[in-house]
Image: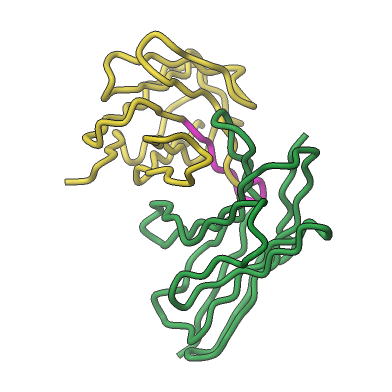
Chain colours: A yellow, B green
Amino acid sequence: DADVTQTPRNRITKTGKRIMLECSQTKGHDRMYWYRQDPGLGLRLIYYSFDVKDINKGEISDGYSVSRQAQAKFSLSLESAIPNQTALYFCATSDLGLVSGELFFGEGSRLTVL
Amino acid sequence: AQTVTQSQPEMSVQEAETVTLSCTYDTSESDYYLFWYKQPPSRQMILVIRQEAYKQQNATENRFSVNFQKAAKSFSLKISDSQLGDAAMYFCALTYNNNDMRFGAGTRLTVKP
């Protein structure tokens, strides 16, 4: 089984719907991140969390919210999805932080908003 | 502000040959870290190589090496003896703290048999 698991792997939804992307990890890491990947833009940070009581906004948090239910679970929500939120979303974890370079990624959740 | 620029959207290389992927960056920090990540068709991002800015020696991992030019803010990735399994998107990334990692737009590498 993957160390960082994202569900769903693919999802098509309609404008205005609420969507939740889930991430769970078995690596025992405290630090978890949500990134968004768009063609020509690379990956951009949406939210990050260093523990269950610590949630921080990233570069592009507008239109998104997150929940850290437990050390191992970090969910990303789109309260009212819009077409420009169509993207590939990645959850990642880190033990020592970004400077260590060891970001462990899930396989991504491809979201299409019609 | 930190920015990372990859000016080559696509590159191709013949199997067994060498290819260099370019990356330039901008940061006002003196201490920072640079990375190359690989994204194969499976989508999962994999760390290829890491470079601390305070280290002058270029990082090497088997067939992968970097040419780090701090003054020029350049961080290129050289892949030697290219293999079919090297075909992927490659992302250059930069961070100076534990809060954010900035990625370039990526370079899609094709390996021809």
Tell me residue B62's x, y (percent).
43, 75
Observer-nearest of B100 and A63? B100
Span shown in magenta: A34-41
Q: Quadrant of the N terminus of chain B?
A: top right
What residue is at 37 percent from the left and 44 percent from the top?
A: A104
Total marks drawn? 0
Q: Quadrant of the C terminus of chain B?
A: bottom left
Left/right of residue A69 with respect to residue B66 in the rendered view: left
Is A108 magenta? The answer is no
Name the residue nearer the viewer: A6 or A100: A100
Residue at image location 51% in from the left, 35% down from the top: A35
Q: Residue furthest top?
A: A53
Quarter of the view holding residue A85:
top right
Q: Position of residue A100 (x, y in %)?
A: 48, 43
Whether residue B77 is situated above or below residue B101 in the rendered picture: below
Question: Residue at the location (43% across, 52% down)?
Answer: B45
Q: x and y percent of residue B104 in the render?
A: 66, 51
Q: Quadrant of residue A91?
A: top left
Point out the residue furthest to the right here: B72
Q: Position of residue A3 (x, y in %)?
A: 24, 42
* The one of B80 and B89 positioned closer to us in this rendering: B80
Q: Is residue B104 above or below residue B81?
A: above
Decide whether residue A37 is among the magenta residues: yes
Taking the spot 51% from the left edge, 38% from the top edge, the residue there is A98
Magenta stretch, main secondary structure, is strand
The residue at the far left in this view is A1
